[in-house]
Image (spheres, coloured by chain):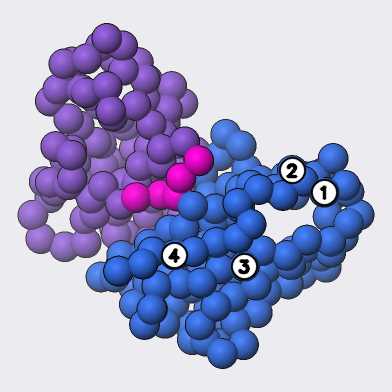
Chain colours: A purple, B blue
Amino acid sequence: AQSVTQLGSHVSVSEGALVLLRCNYSSSVPPYLFWYVQYPNQGLQLLLKYTTGATLVKGINGFEAEFKKSETSFHLTKPSAHMSDAAEYFCAVQAHNQGGKLIFGQGTELSVKP
Amino acid sequence: EAGVAQSPRYKIIEKRQSVAFWCNPISGHATLYWYQQILGQGPKLLIQFQNNGVVDDSQLPKDRFSAERLKGVDSTLKIQPAKLEDSAVYLCASSLAGTGDYEQYFGPGTRLTVT
């Protein structure tokens, strides 16, 4: 069965510092990979996704993630944190042949200090 | 383009009562999902519809939860009777089709509190 592990339920960075949110997955076949962001009292918004092709994926709001098959990882980064980046971030995987179901990690809450 | 609509946004009920949530997906989206998000956890799929047919309901507690999408457009999720552990945010999402090539768009969710 597929699973997703996000290392660290809470991450705190200073404004302008590097953001690194970690995600590892377990799957016998590399799945599709996603990062979503959730602001308080709102639904999830897609930041970026990896399906095929280039392993470094750029998303919205300056975020990017790199798929590393050998490490079964899909870590999310942003060079310089902004106060507006404070939110909950979810990594998710989707099997190629299971109808679109997303399996989510437990989430990482990002705090940005001024 | 209007997003995924959900109502109500908040609901408080006592255990053993029943409750229903409504979702209207983005126009033209054939695939509709209901996820349950318990506090401190990631969303978990309850049921997936393709048009008005069920694709996956393997994690739906069928003794108390039911869902329908009769005309292949909007959907209703019902809980009867509710338990304390059903307290969660219920998220509806829709996509053009059920593969990774198509983004899932999420509604704002319904926050259910069972007392």
Identify the element where label 1 is drawn: strand
Give the crowd class for mark 3: few <14, some 14-19, many >=20 residues within 10 Å.
some
Identify the element where label 4 is drawn: loop
Q: Say whether disc 3 or disc 2 marks the residue closer to the N-terminus.
A: 3
Q: Which residues are magenta?
A: A41-45
What's under tag 3, amino acid-wise? Answer: Trp
Q: Say whether disc 4 or disc 2 marks the residue closer to the N-terminus.
A: 4
Q: Which residue in the protein does label 1 denote?
A: B13
What's under tag 4, amino acid-wise? Answer: Val
Chain label for disc 2: B
Residue B70 horizontal/vertical position (percent): 62, 87
Q: Say whether disc 3 or disc 1 marks the residue closer to the N-terminus.
A: 1
Q: Are marks 2 and 1 in contact (CB under 8 Å)?
A: yes
Whole-number angstrom distance, CA of label 1 to CA of label 4 = 24 Å
Q: Which residue in the protein does label 2 denote?
A: B113
Q: Residue at x 51, y 82 (%)?
A: B73
Whole-number angstrom distance, CA of label 2 to CA of label 1 = 6 Å
Give the crowd class for mark 1: few <14, some 14-19, many >=20 residues within 10 Å.
some
| Relative depth, front residue between A1 and A108 | A108
